[in-house]
Image (cartoon, rainbow, N blue to C red):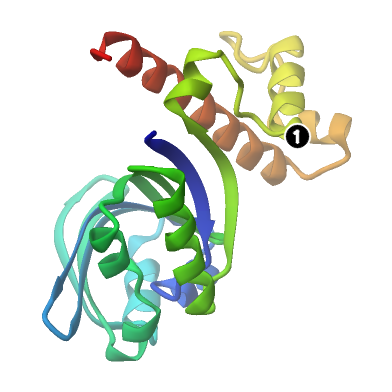
Amino acid sequence: MSVIAQLTLESPILRETLRAEPEVRLVRVQQSTFGNDPGRLMFWAESDDLDAFEAAAEDDSSVSAVVRLTRSGDRSLYRIDIADRCAEQLTYPTLVELDIAVLHAEGETGGWNVRFHAPNRRSLQRYVETCRESEISVSVNYLYTKRDVEDGETHLTDSQREVLALALEEGYFDIPRGTTTHELGEHLDVSGQAVSERLRRALRNSVAQTLEEERLSSSPE
């Protein structure tokens, strides 16, 4: 039975850049390899200071070349050539081998948050094992199968559920907003940035589950 999973990977690709520019958000578009060449990665970068991002990417030891393809406001589409030093830690060939599809991937300070579709749990397990053998840290944010969705299971962590409930109660989703992430953070004794990250992950998980439920309900058995 197929599996949908979201993992956080501490990939070496652009790790130094994400640490140097913590406000930037990367959204993967495509990755490819060429023979023994580590390959290329295409992604959108969103930041208030794209010039600083580009400078950091050009100095990143995981990158051999940076090319800006187009720019629109505070985001640009980039292509990078991956440095040879990262070849042994790249897991893209394993994804292809195991028929695992990348549905969505975002790069942030804490690593790459990636949503996968795997043909079965064993394939996903093999992929996680490959990551760990390559010394890539992996955290499983959620994982569910078609049967899980049919049974109506929820895939929010306790902290995500807590912050969503508080945000709804305090009017964060109202127009105009009745509170801020900073104020929510004071309730939870965490920073406003932590609240923002939890909300984003919680909303992403909820939306992903809703869309998957719709897809499954419209798909033939």
Q: Quick one: label 1, few (<14), some, or many (20+) residues within 10 Å?
A: some
Residue type at tag 1: Ser
- At horizontal 76% and vertical 14% (from top left) the residue drawn is 170
- Residue 153 image offset from top left, x and y in percent: 60, 19
Q: Where residue 174 appears, x then y in whole percent?
A: 60, 9
Apparent side of residue 141 relative to residue 180 in the rendered image (left or right): left
Residue 207 showing in the rendered view: no
Report the residue marked by disc 1: 159
Placement of the N terminus among the 4 image quadrants? top left
In the structure shown, which secondary structural element does the residue marked by tag 1 occupy?
helix
Residue sitting at 46 percent across and 30 percent down?
145
Reply above or below: 60 against 175.
below
Q: Is residue 125 left or right of residue 159?
A: left
Judge whether residue 188 can be spotted in this image.
Answer: yes
Residue closer to the observer: 166 or 124 = 124
Number of callouts: 1
Quadrant of res 66: bottom left
Q: Which quadrant holds residue 59?
A: bottom left
Q: Is residue 206 left or right of residue 198?
A: left
Identity of the residue drawn at 36% across and 82% down: 62
Picture coordinates of residue 67, whole percent (x, y)? 17, 71
> In this picture, is 129 found above or below 171?
below
Q: Nearer the viewer, residue 196 or 72?
A: 196
Q: Percent x, y for residue 69?
A: 12, 60
Residue closest to the eye, 1 or 133: 1
Quarter of the image that includes the C terminus: top left
